[in-house]
Amino acid sequence: FWGDMAGHWGINRTMGQIHALLYATAEPLDTDTIMARLQVSRGNANMNLRALVDWRLVDKVNRPGSRKDFYVAETDVWKICATVIEERKRREIKPVQVAVADTLNTLHADGPLTTEAAQTLDTRLHNLADLLRVFDAITDALLPFVQAKNEKKLQRLATFAHRLNGSGANGNGTRGNAG
């Protein structure tokens, strides 16, 4: 399940499976154990362990008396969530913002847009840039609450958003004051 869910969080299935195994295991595991338990190749295990370390979801640790690398998962779910938000923003939102800005600069490099096609593209790119700014602002606004593990304020924000949307639900499927 964790492997399937990982795809929705922006990481691949094997990364999710490795993280789930490490998350569920009290002791650090080496690559051979991970390969055996998940039935994945050494190359696949190594590539995904490096990616998990890069994402700051897994740490490489040493064990006295062993020359092998061992791995442990971050187990604080709030920190995991904050890290995934930060990494997706850095890896997905920011590069698209840069690409859209570069494309707009290129589009306008020769002066005013004279064709209907160029004007249409300009409008669409500005709409995309606006949407990305909103996503960026939302993550910037929510991330401190996730990092502070402030469930109560996040629940209140969810209730507020539901009310703005007209649903009246407080974020947990019931009506009422969330605090």
Image (spheres, rainbow, N blue to C red):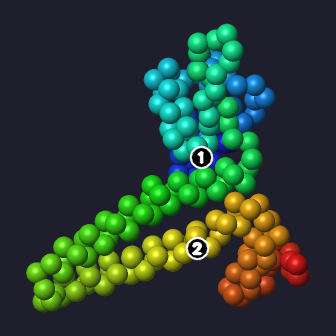
Outermost front residue? 64
Residue 94 occupies which quadrant of the picture?
bottom left
- Residue located beneath label 2 in the image: 138
Question: Compared to 62, does 117 lie above or below?
Answer: below
Q: Position of residue 23 (x, y in %)?
A: 72, 36
Residue 17 in sight in this render: no
Is 46 displayed left or right of 58 in the figure? left
Q: Nearer the viewer, mark 2 or mark 1?
A: 2
Q: Position of residue 138 (x, y in %)?
A: 58, 73
Q: Residue at x 63, y 48 (%)?
A: 5
Viewer-nearest residue: 66 or 152:
66
Q: Which amino acid, by three-letter code, is at mark 1?
A: Ala
> In terms of sequence position, does the residue under pointer 2 or pointer 1 come before the other?
1
- Residue located beneath label 1 in the image: 6
Residue 26 occupies which quadrant of the picture?
top right
Q: Is disc 2 placed on a helix, strand or loop?
A: helix
Residue 62 in sight in this render: yes
Q: CA distance from mark 2 to mark 1?
A: 21 Å
- Count of marks, rendered view: 2
Q: Is disc 1 placed on a helix, strand or loop?
A: helix
